[in-house]
Amino acid sequence: MTDLCVIGAGPAGLMAAEVAADAGLSVLIADAKPSFGRKFLMAGKSGLNLTKDEPFADFTAAFGTAQSWLKPMLENFSNTDVQTWATALGQEVFTGSSGKVFPKTMKASPLLRAWLLRLTDKGVQFKTRWKWTGWDGSDLSFQTPDGSETIPPRTCVLALGGASWPKLGSDGAWADIFANEGINLSPFKPANMGFTVNWSDYMKPHFGAPIKTVMLTSGNASHRGDFVISSKGIEGSGVYAVSRNMREGANLFVDLLPDTDIKTLQDRIDRLSKKASRSSALRKALRLDPAKAALLNEFARNVTLPNLAQAAKKLQVKHAGPRPIAEAISTAGGIPQSELTEHLMLRKKSGIFCAGEMLNWEAPTGGYLITGCLATGRQAGLGAVAYLST
C-alpha cells in the first residue's frame, strides 16, 4: 500500500510529495494530463517569476484577507526559502530591479526537469493520464487509459488547482466532488485577469498596443506599471495588480502621466495658441504617445481643452467586468479555512489534505502565486507525514 498519493503535479503537489519522500514515505503522484507541471511551464514562458525579494511583512501583505491564514506557512517556506530551494535544484536566480526573482535561464522547464529527476531519485512514482473521479469508500478512484482504477493509499494530498486555464489541467471539476461530500466551498472567481471593454471603432488601430508607465488605481489599491489594449479589453500586469478591487466593483482610474504634475501639464496647455486643436494639445502639451492619446479620447472625448490635463491625470477607464475565469491567470474561491485544519486536512475527510489554488486565497502576480503554492504544498505534505506518525 502506498503511504501517500498526491493528486496534481503542479508546484503544490510536487512540494508535498518531496516533503513526504524526505520523511521516508512511499509516494505516488497522479495527474490527469500526459505530462506534469503544465500550468507551471506556461507561467514560465515569459520568464519564470518564482518569488519577490522584499521584506517579509510586505510580502505577506500581498495575500490580502488570507494573510493571517497563510502567514505561518509562508514563515516556514518564505520568499527567501524559495530562492534557496531553486538554487539547490541547480537553478541560479537573480533579482530584477522591481524585486522579482527569476532563474537565470528565465525558463521553467530546466527547474521542473531537475525537480522531477530529484523526486525520481527519492523513489517517488508517477502516473500520467490518471484523472481523479472521487472516492469509492475510502479508496481513490481514477479514470485511466486502461479504464477505471482504485487505489487505497494511507493518506492523500489533493493539489488540483483552481478553475483557470482548464486546458492545462486546472478545470475546477473537483468542486462538484467536494459538494457531493458536503464540503462547503467559496464560489470560484477570476483573479489576475483582464477586463472586457466595449471599444469604439476608433480604438481598432491600437489593439495590441502597450500603455506604458502609468499609475492605475482602483479602490485602495494603486500600482505603477504597464498594461495592454486588446480587442477584448485591457490586460497585463498593471491591470492584474488592481484586479481584485475592480472585480469587487471599484472603478479604475489611470494616471497617464505619473511623472508630471497637473500644474505643469496645465501650464503647457495654457501656453498653446487659442486656435490649437485637441490633437495638438495631446501631442505638444501632454506629450502623449498615440496609444495613450487614443485612450484619453476614448474615455474623455467630451472633455474640453482646459480640462484635458485633469482628465489625463485621472482617467476613468470604464469596463464591462472581468474576462471569463478560463482566461484568468489564477482564481479566488475554493476551500475556505473553516473546512480545513491548521495542517490543511479536510475536517470532513480524515487523512485528506489540500494545497495550492484549491484553497480560498488569492495574490497578485509577481512571484506571490508560486510561493503560496509551494508553501501550502509543503504544509500539506508535513500534515500528511504527521498524520501517519500518530
Image (tube, helix red, strand yellow):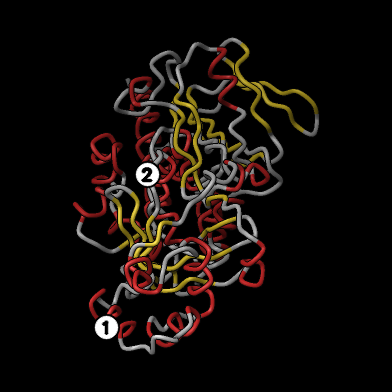
Q: Quadrant of the C terminus?
A: top left
Q: Amino acid at mark 1?
A: Asp
Q: Amino acid at mark 2?
A: Ala
Dot 2: element: loop
Density class for disc 2 (Cα within 10 Å; few <14, some 14-19, many ≥20) is some
Kindly identify the residue that appears in the image at 45 percent across and 61 percent down. Answer: 237
Query: Residue 250 — which label?
Result: 2
In this view, the mark in front (1 or 2): 1
- Camera-side residue: 219 or 13? 219
Query: Residue 267 — which label?
Result: 1
* Vertical comparison of 18 with 286: above or below: above
Kindly identify the residue that appears in the image at 43 percent across and 13 percent down. Answer: 348
Measured Cα–Cα span from mark 1 to mark 2: 32 Å
Q: Quadrant of the N terminus?
A: top right
Q: Quadrant of residue 151?
A: top right
- Camera-side residue: 311 or 34? 311
